[in-house]
Amino acid sequence: MKTLTLLSSLIIIVSVSLCKANHRSEGGGFTVDLIHRDSPLSPLYNPTYARSDRLQNAFLRSVSRASGLSKRAGFASKIDADISVIPGEYVMRIQIGNPPVEVVGVADTGSDLTWAQCQPCKHCYKQAGLPFLQPNASSTYRAVSCQSKACEALEGNRYGCSSGNVCEYGIRYGDLSYTKGDLANDTFWFGSTPLKNVAFGCGHDNNGSFPDDASGIIGLGDGPLSIINQLNDTIQGKFSYCLVSALTNSSNVTGKIHFGDHALVSGPDVVSTPLKLTIPPTYYYVVLEHVSVGNRKLPYKSTTDIGLDVENVIIDSGTTVTIVGQEFYDELTAALTEAIGGNSTLPDPTGMFDFCYKDLDLGRVPNVTFSFTGADVELPPENTFIQVQKGVSCFTIVGSDGIAIFGNLLQQNLLVGFDLVNKMVSFRPTDCRNHS
Ligand SMILES: *[C@@H]1O[C@H](CO)[C@@H](O)[C@H](O)[C@H]1NC(C)=O
Ligand SMILES: *[C@@H]1O[C@H](CO)[C@@H](O)[C@H](O)[C@H]1NC(C)=O
Ligand SMILES: *[C@@H]1O[C@H](CO)[C@@H](O)[C@H](O)[C@H]1NC(C)=O
Ligand SMILES: *[C@@H]1O[C@H](CO)[C@@H](O)[C@H](O)[C@H]1NC(C)=O
Ligand SMILES: *[C@@H]1O[C@H](CO)[C@@H](O)[C@H](O)[C@H]1NC(C)=O
Ligand SMILES: *[C@@H]1O[C@H](CO)[C@@H](O)[C@H](O)[C@H]1NC(C)=O
Ligand SMILES: *[C@@H]1O[C@H](CO)[C@@H](O)[C@H](O)[C@H]1NC(C)=O
Ligand SMILES: *[C@@H]1O[C@H](CO)[C@@H](O)[C@H](O)[C@H]1NC(C)=O
């Protein structure tokens, strides 16, 4: 049952969003709230669930996701290449159909196709508190044909063609979980903003360790079926998010995800780095040049030949910890040990992290700066250390070979903006608790 605990505990539920369309002629924008599952605002808030359990679960998922992303990015055998990893960190609430039906989907920057459980269910996993979609109840639902562009765009996730010429999708996940169903078009609602003819997976056969408080997954990757690309006419490749973490503070606050005109990241303290869109698409790669501990600069080296030119890190909202190559990790922690002083490091009593301190005074921890090409992102100790139990704080970066991932604990209190048209990722230090 470990897997189930893992998945269900990681969800971060999103509150109902109230977002008004921006009706400017050359575009528009909308904003959706993100609430951590652990927030008292979440209907699933369980005050008895220990924070350390949540952290442990998030950690385990990060490691498995990293390994899955590495596989998908082509570092392992071809057989694994189309196996995705179930994301699970942040969830957003949208509506699909006419009349609109609420769908809570895991917001995933690491996948493209959005899907939700649909009736009739050949098999549907238990879904708490939300109705399944009913295609026959939506006046705007249209199954997509096998000859359509959208069907072609499924590529490895194309499952077959039904006798009625309906395009069928299928996605397998690393732990034998899967979703299968019809590719369809319907209206998506972001708050009061309707967007017509969005292709998504209407999943009639879904099983495995999906979070039971989500109806499916919302794909925010850069592939053609991602909502980012499908909504391009409206949002022009722009979205941004500001993450609050309930791992460090399960308070009554929400994060935000913005699209289109609402997603601009501007101001004097914004830094930007080129976004490297690769083939096959999906992940948001950037180039990490060095990491500084205080004033000490450590050139970044990937420890694996990842088969890409220079892009060496994925920015991912769905992974909790940050993962760097093992050799670089050793250098980084050596530099930190020196900077922090003393010899009080200890192994993490929970077994997750390698680099922890007892009674760490955060005031002794220097800022750690991730220098992406052209963008120095300075991270205060509140991002780089997390208290795993009373009196024990661990470094939120871990070492593991494979593709590196800039995870969501480091992204806390940064407004992170993606612009797929101008191919830039921007960062601005922001108090996400007060950001609207
Ligand atoms: C729609 O389909 C569901 C089963 O998938 C069925 O229970 C329901 O009666 C149908 N509704 C209509 C209006 O046909
Ligand atoms: C689905 O939507 C696309 C536009 O997004 C449109 O080109 C296509 O014809 C639609 N398919 C159906 C079956 O409605
Ligand atoms: C669903 O998955 C579980 C394991 O996750 C398995 O035990 C069960 O047999 C599966 N059910 C179906 C209908 O495939
Ligand atoms: C998205 O829209 C922008 C602006 O209209 C355009 O330049 C760009 O090519 C579009 N991108 C895609 C993938 O269609
Ligand atoms: C948690 O958030 C609340 C409300 O925003 C704030 O008052 C409190 O200081 C925070 N606690 C910690 C430990 O950061
Ligand atoms: C959370 O915020 C809402 C509205 O902002 C407020 O009504 C509610 O009392 C707050 N709950 C807690 C536990 O602080
Ligand atoms: C370092 O740790 C060792 C073993 O716990 C201890 O004997 C020594 O006094 C410590 N030194 C400092 C400077 O804290
Ligand atoms: C550390 O980084 C934070 C966030 O960018 C910044 O506000 C703070 O001034 C920095 N602290 C030091 C000592 O440079």
Image (spheres, helix red, strand yellow):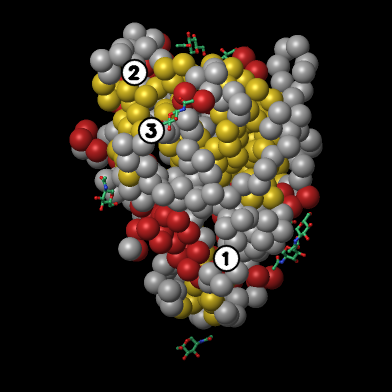
The quadrant where residue 326 appears: bottom left
Residue 267 picture location, percent across and down: 79, 35
The residue at the point 39 percent across, 30 percent down is: 309
The quadrant where residue 150 appears: top left
The residue at the point 62 percent across, 20 percent down is: 195
Depth order, front residue of 3/397: 3
Task: Find out if the beta carbon at label 2 lies less than 8 Å from the nearest ligand 2 atom.
Answer: no
Residue wearing tag 3:
120
Task: Find out if the beta carbon at label 3 lies less than 8 Å from the nearest ligand 1 atom.
Answer: yes
Observer able to see residue 317: no
Q: Residue 229 carries which label?
A: none
Inspect the image, locate mark 1, and give the three-letter code of the amino acid beneath it: Asn
Inspect the image, locate mark 3, and give the three-letter code of the amino acid beneath it: Pro
Q: Which mark is residue 46?
A: 1
Residue 370 picture location, percent across and down: 57, 48
Inspect the image, locate mark 2, and give the three-letter code of the amino acid beneath it: Cys
Is the C terminus in the top left, top right, bottom left or bottom right quadrant?
A: top right
Residue wearing tag 2:
167
Depth order, front residue of 271/184: 184
Q: Where does ligand 4 appear, by image quarter?
A: top right
Observer able to see residue 104: yes
